[in-house]
Structure formats: C-alpha cells, structure tokens
Amino acid sequence: MALFPQRFIDDLKHQADIVVVIQDYVSLKKTGATYKGLCPFHGEKTPSFHVHRDKGFFHCFGCGVGGDVFKFLELHEKIGFGDAIKLLAQRFGVTPPEMEENDEQRANAAERETLLKVHESAAKWFQQQLASPAGARIRRQIESRGITDATSQALGLGFAPPAREALKTALLEEGFSQPVLLRAGLVVQRDDASVIDRFRNRLMIPICRDTGSVIAFGGRAVDPDQQPKYLNSPETPIYSKGRTLYGLNVSKNAIRERKFAILVEGYFDFAQVYQAGFQGVVASCGTALTPQQAQQLRRFTNKVVLSFDPDAAGQGAAAKSCEMLAAEGFSVNVAVLPAGEDPDTFVRTKGAPGYAERLEHSAPYLEYLLDRAAANHNLNTDEGRVKFLGDMLPVASRIPDAAMRDRFADRLSFKARVTDDVVRAEIRRAVVQKQPALTKREVSSFGRVTKAEKGLIWLLIHQPEAALDALATLDGPDFEGLAAQVILDLARKLNDDKGFSPSALLERLTMVDAQLVTAIASEGEAHVHDAYDCVRIIKRLRWERERAAIQREIDRLQEVGAQDGEKLQELLIRKYGVIQRIEALV
Ligand SMILES: [Zn+2]
C-alpha cells in the first residue's frame, strides 16, 4: 500500500498554503483574519465560504462543508486522499519520499504478503473442488440460480467440501504454516485444541480488493437447514469488512466508463446484474455502507443507483446508505423494483431489458422519498396532507443546496396542493431550526454538542496547548455518550501518540465530524473560554450519569423489596463516593 509517511504529509501541508491552493479554484478576498469567497460547493450570490490561512482550514456557513487543504482537493477534484497528496505535491514541486520502513513495518508487510498468498491458494483450491466430481451438486445449484459458467468463473466461485481438514491439509502441503492459516481465518481452533477448516460444505465466494487480490471469503450454505446461511471470514490484517466493497475488482472499469455504479445488496444480486450486462455494480452485502466504502467508490464515480428490494429500500441499511452517500456528496438515485422482488429474481424473470428500463426510470433519492411519502398518506384529506408535509419538511431542510431546496419545495407544494409560498416558508423555518447541509443523524449530533464540548473544540484549534493540557485530564469513560466523543478522543490520542495539530485532527475525521469542527472553529470566540472549565463540566456530566445509574439500581432493588442488604449498602456507598466527586468539582 502506497501510504505516505506522516512526516511527509505534515511537511507538505506546511508548505502548501491553503489560501494559495483554494485560490486556484475560488477567488478570495481578505477580510480581517480570514479570506472570503463564493462557495464552490453550493450556489450562492453572497460569499459565505471562509478560509483560515493560519489554522489551515476552510468552512462554508452556507452549506456546512469544511476541512483542511486535502479535504478541499478531495471534494473539488473528486479524488481520494492519496491522490490529493500527489496533486498537492506536484503543485508545490515536492517529490514524495521513498517509503521508509522499520523492522516492524517490514514484518507487517511480510505478514500481509503471506496472508495474500494463502488466500490466493485457498481460492484456487476452492475452485478446483467446484470443478471436481465432488462439486457436481454445487455446480447444479449455481446453474439453477441462473448463473452461467462464465460468470461463476469471472467471480471465482468455489466449493468447500464437507470435510474437517481438507483445505488445511492442502495448504499445509503447499508449505503454509498452521499459524498463518489461523491468522488468515481459514481454519479455526476448537475448544479441544483441534484445528479444523472454517468453511465446510459451502459455496465459496472470494472477496477481493479492487486490484483483484483475494482477501477474504463469503461462504454460503448449500443445504436447506444449514446454519448460518452465510459465514464470512473474520477481520484480518488484510481484510476489514467496512472498507471493502464487494465486486469492485470486476466492476471498476465499467463504473468509470458508464459514470455510475449500481448498488445491490447481496452476492447473487450482484452476479445476476453483472451477468445481464450491467457490469458497473457493487454489493453492500447486507449492511449499511460506511464512509470508507463510499471513498473507495468515489475513486471511480460520484453517482450511485440504488437497486434494492422495494420493501427494504426505504428503511434500514438501504436508507442509511442513501443518507450517508448523499452526505458524502454522491448523487443518489433509487431504481424501484416491484414489491417482493430483488435484483436477483427480477433479472431472472424480466431479463436485461426489463432491468435496463428500471434503471432508466430510477428517480433521485429525494423524488423517491417524495413518492413514497405521497403513497403513504391520503393527500385528498387535510390531515393526510399535513402528515405528508410533516414527513417531508425535515427531508427538505437537509438539502444542502438552496436552489435545489427551492425546486424541491415546488415539487412538494404540487404534490400536497399547497401554495408554494407556504411550503417555502415552512422549509426555511425547518432549515433555520435544523442547521442546513447536515443529514438527520448529523443534525441531532450537532444539536447535542454541549457548550463545554464546543468550547474544547474551539480551543483545540485556536489555543491547542491549553486545550490539550485540559483534555489530558479526561479518560475514556468521561467521553462516553458525548456527541463530540470521537473528536475529543481522537485529539487526545493524537496528542499521546504522534503530536496534535488542527490539521492532523481534521485529516483523520470523517467528513461530518470535520464539518462540525470547522463550524465551531469558525465562530468568533469559544462558548466556554477556559479549557479547564470545559473539562470540569464534562467530568461533572460523567459523574451525574454515574449517579443516575446507581440511583436507578437502588430504586430497582427497593422496588422489588430485595433482601440483599449488602448489595444495597454497597450501592449507597458508591453513590456517596460519586456525590463527593461531584462536589469536589464545584
Ligand atoms: Zn457552501
């Protein structure tokens, strides 16, 4: 992996004046300590896009985007972090250094190399088993699902026979050691210390990096009563589920060419859609997409057509994926299938032309939500229209772009048959109440950030030394449940490990958390001026939480009339201890 040494990144950031970089794209005017211009990420006529040269970050008060110089390039050029570094290095005439490795890094690299090799061998072996006479039954099963030999081979499908040690024996014979097999998750150690194959009697689906290297497996049950239906590789040094997008290895070129990716849920949806000629497809494999997976995808496109079971598309994992993709700046469409159908069954019955038509008629995610809400309410009654608007106003208020919000207001008023002035006024009100540009999840977390947290975050950027000193007096449990938990915890860890800087913090945060930081840091002054005051409030909140928890336990014991006086006594002592801690803080 071509990672750049942190020292190089820090140096580059030091040299790359954020104002100079952004001025390549946006015309900026100096006003006071900051630079202002028209935001390149949303349409506006008066400048609300601010660049703070000395702190090295930008923030837009209109749409809420913000981050460091790398984040700007990532967003503007639609490239990944690595490419942003390369671009910046080029711009400032800096040559990336040769990778420097210490012994530990070399050992890790060697281990990853071995893990990749053992997966490659295992994939080959599973494929041989599928092709052998023993795999005949599984081949028929694949065929009966309408998957051709060519597709099966393109996806590298295989078969793990119902034997305890078949794969283990084969790989040991090839010269891999048992610890390597355990580390790869291909075998498991049982309580009686025996070591057996993890995947037995399963259809094997290799999971690959986008470069094609096999890094894990999904194993599907082949008997009706076999549990679990899917068994997956565990996380290993080379495999992290949240960072891997299934199918990208065979679909990335088509995605790039056709300028969009079809997102389906399962392996068989993927196989069917891919086989039908829509090769630009990826599968989320049943869980909501993570921002890391979105980043993988962004290297090839920023447009996604979601193709899920219609019952699932509006809720759960699919809805979460939509919101996250939209928040990460993707354009998201939804291709609705008939009720009860998933891409797998639909393509099998209606073929490629039917599926192509569904894709063509896919609606933008917002339109899709609108149609669904309209279908859920009776718009012929006042009550139904009010409920419909009630559902849609929060959605409207989350649209980052003002012009888009207006267009949505038109659609909304048309559907609800209410004059558009009323709808626009309502949306404006919802926007003001709810912070534009942030999705529901973010709005709620933004809203829950306490003054003490905001104070610490502001100070971390503007007076880092004082903030870090104060932060060092907090520990893990103090952060629990805080809206800014991730941010404060990361700042503390950076300080412990390799040195904190505002840009090192911004660089490592998700887009949403980075925006929270830049929004707070852009304010004129801190909500709470003294870092130790912030820390005291946060400590106090923690002990208050603890006191409430103990009290609940005491109430519960007394309610059931527990005879256990000792337990009650112990709780009362603990409660007294916590109260003392709270009083000591005042
Ligand atoms: Zn903006």
Image (tube, rainbow, N blue to C red):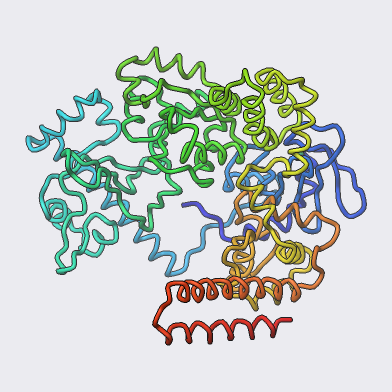
Nearer to us in this view, 567 or 120: 567
Nearest to the observer: residue 86 or residue 206: 206
Q: Is residue 33 left or right of residue 129?
A: right
Q: Position of residue 282 (x, y in %)?
A: 42, 34
Horizontally, residue 470 falls left or right of residue 231, namely right
When the figure is inspected, residue 514 is found, relative to residue 44, above or below; the finding is below
| Vertical comparison of 474 with 251: above or below | below
At 76% from the left and 66% from the top, the residue drawn is 459
Res. 339 image quadrant: top left
User: Residue 574: image x %, image y %?
Assistant: 53, 84
Q: Quadrant of ligand 1?
A: top right
Tell me residue 493's x, y (percent): 59, 69
Q: Is residue 274 visible?
A: no
The front one of 492 and 72 is 492
569 sits to left or right of 542: left
Is 227 drawn above or below residue 357 in the view shown? below
Number of marks in the rendered image: 0
